[in-house]
Image (spheres, grey):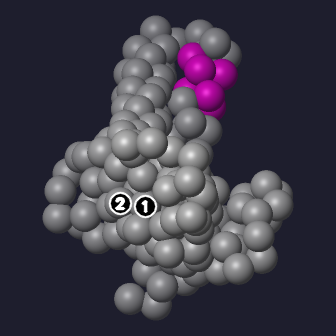
Amino acid sequence: MSEFLINGIFAAIAGLGFSYANKPPKQILIFCALFGGCGFMLRVLILANTINYALATFLSALCVGLVCVFVAQKLKTPIEILAFPSLLPMIPGLFAYKTVLAVFMFIKSEDEAKKIHYLVEIFDYGFTTISTMFALAIGISVALLVFYEKSFTMTRRKNFRNKYIKK
């Protein structure tokens, strides 16, 4: 349990660092860190109950996106400022690293059996990396597209909307 919380804290720090680099308003930083850590921990919880890494990532990204929509509305900030830094801890860096490592080992190896082994690893880790990245993109896109109308009025005040936007 403590390892689970420590990983969540490090994921929150990663989300905070990425959001800080984009220079959002100061009150937004804590929410980016919170959503980054919670989204990562949610993926770990879902992954414990399913065997599909990409499905767990998709569901976690969808949940983070939906929560970010409602929090962004309360904070009067664009959804993307909250959502994108929150997804950073879920990028499958380990699988990408293992893919590149398997490519180098495949090139270096002279034994036919080892080449076949490394080729299988290239496809296994590579497809996991690609499917997880697509799951992140689709999960957040679904949340943003469902609330597409809200994204235009997210940072506007009601007086502005009533005065300039005709229904």
Residue 42, picture quadrant: bottom left
Q: Nearer the viewer, residue 101 or 156?
A: 156
State yes or no: discs 2 and 1 in contact (Cβ < 8 Å): yes
115 relative position to 97: left or right? left
Q: Which residue is mark 2?
A: 66
Q: Main secondary structure of the magenta part?
A: helix
Q: Does the image show residue 37?
A: no
Determine the residue positioned at 35% across, 60% down: 66
132 relative position to 163: left or right? left
Identify the mark at residue 21; answer none if there is no mark: none
43 relative position to 51: left or right? right
Q: Is residue 5 above or below residue 159?
A: below
Residue 69, picture quadrant: bottom left
Q: Which residue is mark 1?
A: 69
Q: Nearer the viewer, residue 18 or 5?
A: 18
Q: Nearer the viewer, residue 98 or 35?
A: 35
- Amino acid type at circle 2 is Leu
Q: Position of residue 54 (x, y in %)?
A: 32, 43
Q: Is residue 53 above or below residue 7?
A: above
- Amino acid type at circle 1 is Val
Quarter of the image that includes the C terminus: top left
Determine the residue positioned at 27% across, 60% down: 47
Q: Is residue 99 above or below residue 108?
A: below
Residue 99, picture quadrant: top right
State the SS at label 1: helix
Does the magenta portion include 103?
A: yes
Q: Position of residue 135 (x, y in %)?
A: 36, 39
Compute the Cα span from label 2 to label 1: 5 Å
